[in-house]
Image (cartoon, grey):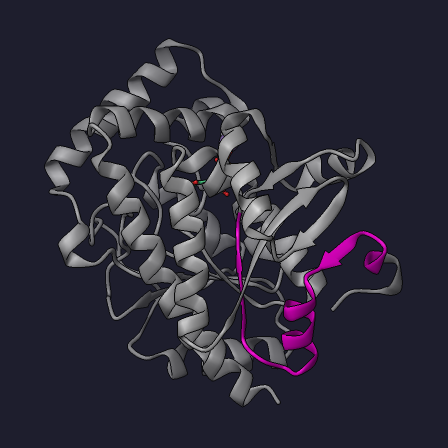
């Protein structure tokens, strides 16, 4: 929960604040997925649909972004539309960027890392998204490791996602999370899902088959004061998934093009996502929306169970 100083920077929507003071389930959502992850206008539909799914599952949605220099927890449909329309023109904000976007009174789209930071300040412990950032495939040369992983190590928010895209090196990503003490939970699966596909070559650390089980483990973790987040990995619904070999081909092409064009730093992930969208003639976007919706449902169910335990 926030200190009085942090309160000066936060702007929590009244219905979200109301739910939090009553210890009701709240699920955070990021905004980089809106601006940089999915093209307009599908991103607007996705953002609104995901909020509705969370509400239908008994939780309060809180999409997070920085607007006019305030940490906004809960956006209006108009604010979502602005972020969605300005797309990659919006500043992509990770941990290092937050103070500058605040000082500049600017607008920023929050990544997994910065959404976790702001969620924690607001007192939200659950966050649904598509995929997390991780260790990039050529990281031994480029050192490109997402700040999302370090955030998972230090901030007490559980991220419900569809695993990570195999634009990343999934094996190295798991090694990094292991070193940092971040549990990777498979939701109704023993195998780490790889975003567009239900399986990867890697096992998860723990399998949980129900929202109660996840909520109980996270409650024990935070109750004991073992800080840091968790990855709750939910496979994409069967009807929406891509054949593995086909997707592997698109990803290999996108990764190769990024290297050839010298794409670096925070531009890498948005570049790869946009290339995969083009290479699949937009079909990847539908899959992406379906998995986010599914993750929002699971995150809400876990948050509802947790709010009953953590009274
Ligand atoms: N992975 C996806 N879709 C996304 C992202 C990651 O499959 O939209 C976004 C998230 O906001 C994530 C960020 O936090 O990209 C990671 O960026 P980077 O690799 O620059 O840390
Ligand atoms: Mn990076």
Q: Position of residue 300 (x, y in %)?
A: 44, 71
In the rendered view, does 278 fall on the left or right side of 56? left
Quadrant assignment, res 249? top left
Apparent side of residue 284 relative to residue 29 in the rendered image (left or right): left
- Which quadrant would residue 211 be assigned to in this image? bottom left
Looking at the image, which residue is at 36% across and 54% down?
A: 292
* Quadrant, the C terminus: bottom right
Write down the region rendered in magenta: 6-30
Residue 197 in view, yes or no: yes
Nearest the eye: 152 or 143: 152
Magenta segment: does it hold 12? yes
Which residue is at a point 30% across and 45% down the rendered structure image? Answer: 288
- Give x and y (percent) for residue 101: 74, 35
List x then y, in percent, for residue 70: 76, 46
Does the image show residue 160? no
Which residue is painted at 38% across and 49% down in the image? 46
Give the quadrant of residue 154. bottom right
- Depicted 75 relative to depicted 58: above or below: above
């Amino acid at each position: 929960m926030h200190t009085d100083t942090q309160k000066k920077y936060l702007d929590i929507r009244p219905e979200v604040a109301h739910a939090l003071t009553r210890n009701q389930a709240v699920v955070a959502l990021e905004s980089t997925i809106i601006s940089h992850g999915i093209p307009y206008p599908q991103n607007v539909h996705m953002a609104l649909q995901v909020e509705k799914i969370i509400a239908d599952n008994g939780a309060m949605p809180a999409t997070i972004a920085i607007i006019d220099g305030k940490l906004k927890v809960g956006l209006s449909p108009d604010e979502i539309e602005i972020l969605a329309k300005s797309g990659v023109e919006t500043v992509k904000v990770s941990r290092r960027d937050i103070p500058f976007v605040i000082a500049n009174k600017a607008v920023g789209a929050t990544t997994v890392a910065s959404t976790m930071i702001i969620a924690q300040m607001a007192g939200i412990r659950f966050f649904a998204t598509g995929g997390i950032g991780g260790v990039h495939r050529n990281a031994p040369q480029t050192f490109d490791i997402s700040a999302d992983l370090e955030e998972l190590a230090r901030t007490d928010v559980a991220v419900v996602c569809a695993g990570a895209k195999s634009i990343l090196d999934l094996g190295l990503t798991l090694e990094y999370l292991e070193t940092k003490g971040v549990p990777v939970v498979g939701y109704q699966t023993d195998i780490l899902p790889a975003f567009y596909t239900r399986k990867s070559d890697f096992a998860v650390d723990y399998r949980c088959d129900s929202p109660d089980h996840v909520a109980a483990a996270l409650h024990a973790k935070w109750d004991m004061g073992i800080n840091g987040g968790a990855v709750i990995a939910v496979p994409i619904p069967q009807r929406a998934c891509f054949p593995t070999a086909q997707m592997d081909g698109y990803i290999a092409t996108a990764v190769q093009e990024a290297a050839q064009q010298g794409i670096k730093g925070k531009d890498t992930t948005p570049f790869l996502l946009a290339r995969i969208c083009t290479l699949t003639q937009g079909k990847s976007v539908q899959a992406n929306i379906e998995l986010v919706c599914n993750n929002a449902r699971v995150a809400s169910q876990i948050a509802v169970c947790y709010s009953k335990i953590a009274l």
